[in-house]
Amino acid sequence: MTEFTPQPSCADAQESHSLSVSDAKQRISNLVSTLTAWEKLNLRDSLGRILHKPIISPINVPPHNNSAMDGYAIQSADITPDSFTVQQVGIAFAGQPFNGNIQRGECIRIMTGAMMPTDCDTVIMQEQVETNGNTITIHGKHQHGQNVRSAGEDLKTGETILSEGHKITAADLGLIASLGIGEITVKRRLRVAFFSTGDELRSIGEALEEGQIYDSNRYTLYGMLKRLNVNMLDMGVVPDQKQTLKEALQQAAEQADVVITSGGVSVGEADYVKEILAELGHVDFWKIAMKPGRPLAFGKINDALFFGLPGNPVSVMVTFYQFVSAALQQLAGEPVQPKLVMQVPCVSTIKKRAGRFEFQRGILFEDEQGDLKVKTTGEQGSGILRSMSEANCFILLDENCEGISPNSTVTVQPFAGLI
Ligand code: AMP
Ligand code: MG
């Protein structure tokens, strides 16, 4: 675990004390280690989980040389430049090998996947022969070893097939099954506790009184965490009261590897939450040079990682996508995948001032010529969650950008399944 050093805080008056997006990512990454706990699972249950121990092949796959075609297995020494004739002396099916010997001038009928007889090294496709009883006349040009799949050509005994940290996919389930392995060792699932803070928040099913709103952040967080395959502990809404908040944070940190809250970290409220977090752990309040998502609290409460996300619904999603998801992957022991970006012409005019990184919500579309373009979703307020529903990408406008005129090229980051 890396030593945690105090960072610029929300209380800093100067904008120059804002952290850049890339520095914030780096600082988070420096503090995150990898879970060491593991469990054994049945193969099927391991889909989407992270390997703790590599998979080493106990066998060759395929275990024996076998035919890649329905046809006739021969000795390549019999091949001549012109047509030639061999005698069929047996037959081999997949799972039912031919166990006799084969002499020069002989062949066996062989089906796809059937084990090659030890004396044969070549298979002639059935479409290239003429049969007359057991007399098989072979036409065409043929090569030594053709249409034979060699033992171990897919996987070799002792070979590392999948390394620690690999995330199990559907293909991997099949690959591991092909080795006859039914149980594998994976990293324990992350436990993530989260709650929303705010006196104004009500949960679904409760009536709204004046000044109150429904809590949506716990639902977006649920959706994004679900995609990351973690165990979730939804702790509901916690009011802006010192003691209740403190107890909720303590309880969350005891039960989870990661604690995520939303709200209560902006300048107006930061000192109050700050006071509690100073008592419980080591958390810094950052002002990040980005929009949306400027305030972000990050650090540790005991052994748990803590992310205090801003309250605005769009900011929650942007900060989760840009900072939290990679940290969770790192903690889970998964290689952090770089987020895909691409350059496309933007058809909208975008106003922006230099000095902060903006994550505008965009819609990638094909124009009449079939060319990929992007437009903004319109109003970009951090409370307009509909912009996230409508969007299929972020338009990334870096610190130096001073606005976009129509048809200039912008960098977009397509939503990669998490949102
Ligand atoms: P805060 O960061 O607590 O000052 O909240 C910023 C804005 O986000 C306020 O307008 C809050 O009402 C709103 N907000 C905070 N938490 C939530 C939530 N869980 N769901 C919807 N809106 C929220
Ligand atoms: Mg609040």
Image: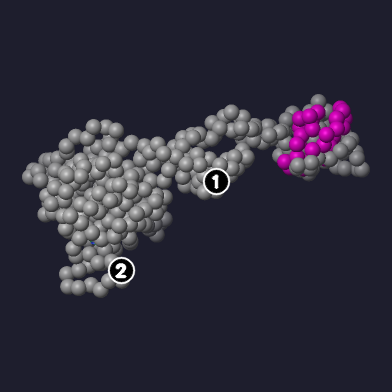
Q: Is residue 332 left or right of residue 308?
A: right
Query: Is residue 160 depicted above or below 396 in this figure?
Result: above
Q: Is residue 105 magenta?
A: yes
Picture quadrant of residue 178: top right
Give x and y (percent) for residue 33.
33, 36
Picture quadrant of residue 151: top right
Q: Which residues are magenta?
A: 97-123
Point out the image quarter for the N terminus: top left
Q: Which residue is mark 2?
A: 204
Instruction: Identify the residue shown where x is 25% and y is 61%.
Output: 237
Q: Is residue 338 left or right of residue 251?
A: right
Judging depth in this view, the residue of 177 and 408 nearest the camera is 177
Instruction: Identify the residue shown where x is 20% and y is 45%.
Output: 280
Give, as a three-letter code, the residue at label 1: Asn
Pointer 1 residue Cβ closer than 8 Å to ligand 1: no
Q: Secondary structure at mark 1?
A: strand
Mark 1 Cα shell of 10 Å, populated few (<14), some (14-19), many (≥20): few
CA gap between label 2 and label 1 equals 37 Å
Specify whether residue 99 is in view.
yes
Q: Earlier in the sequence, mark 2 or mark 1?
A: 1
Q: Which residue is mark 1?
A: 42
Give, as a three-letter code, the residue at label 2: Ile
Give x and y (percent) for residue 295.
18, 49
Query: Is residue 360 depicted above or below 142 in this figure?
Result: below
